Amino acid sequence: MSSLVTFDAIDKEWVPLSRGQFETVMGGAYELYLDHSKAPRIAEDLAPQVLDFLHDGWPSKYELPNGKALDFFEFSDHPREERLELLRAMEAYYADFQRDQLGPELNWMRGRRPNFIAAFEQVIALMREELAATS
């Protein structure tokens, strides 16, 4: 299954290399960095899409998913304040990723570090571009 994040104002998309890459990048941001009170719609939208990842990392906190969610996140459909919060969370997550300061519950293939760096940089750049185009 392919994953997708859309950016309508700039007419671009982020297509991760795999569903796992989508879940690692978006799921880690969701669980560890996103302030759900500042981005409730984004949190509600992302949760079912990254539930496999969340269950793997925090099985006592998240139920085994039913496998029905689609990995399709429409960044542009959310209020600007929430998009800014998601960008902040992604930047903080990426900074910790670069410093190798991620917790052991974040399961990702360390041999694919360059792929994850590229994924973070691509999606963060698209978020910034979309926000600049809609300010």
Image (spheres, rainbow, N blue to C red):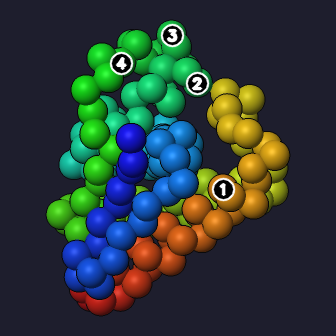
Distance CA(mark 4)–CA(mark 3): 13 Å
Element type at mark 2: helix
- Vertical placement of 83 versus 55: above or below? below
Q: For the residue labelled by badge 4, is the local secondary structure a helix, a strand or a loop?
A: loop
Q: CA distance from mark 2 to mark 4?
A: 13 Å
As drawn, the label of residue 57 is 2
Mark 4 and mark 3 in contact? Answer it, CB < 8 Å: no
The earlier-in-sequence mark between 4 and 3 is 3
Residue at image position (65%, 34%) is: 106
Tag 1: amino acid: Phe
x, y (%) of residue 116? 66, 56
Q: Nearer the viewer, mark 1 or mark 2?
A: 1
Q: Which residue is mark 3?
A: 60
> Sequence-wise, which precedes: disc 2 or disc 4?
2
Three-letter amino acid code at disc 4? Pro
- The secondary element bearing badge 1 is classed as helix
Image point (46%, 16%), residue name = 61
Q: Quadrant of residue 63?
A: top left
Per the rendering, the mark at residue 116 is 1
Residue on which the image places disc 4: 65
Nearer the N terminus, badge 1 or badge 3?
A: 3
Single out the mark in the foreground, 4 or 3: 4
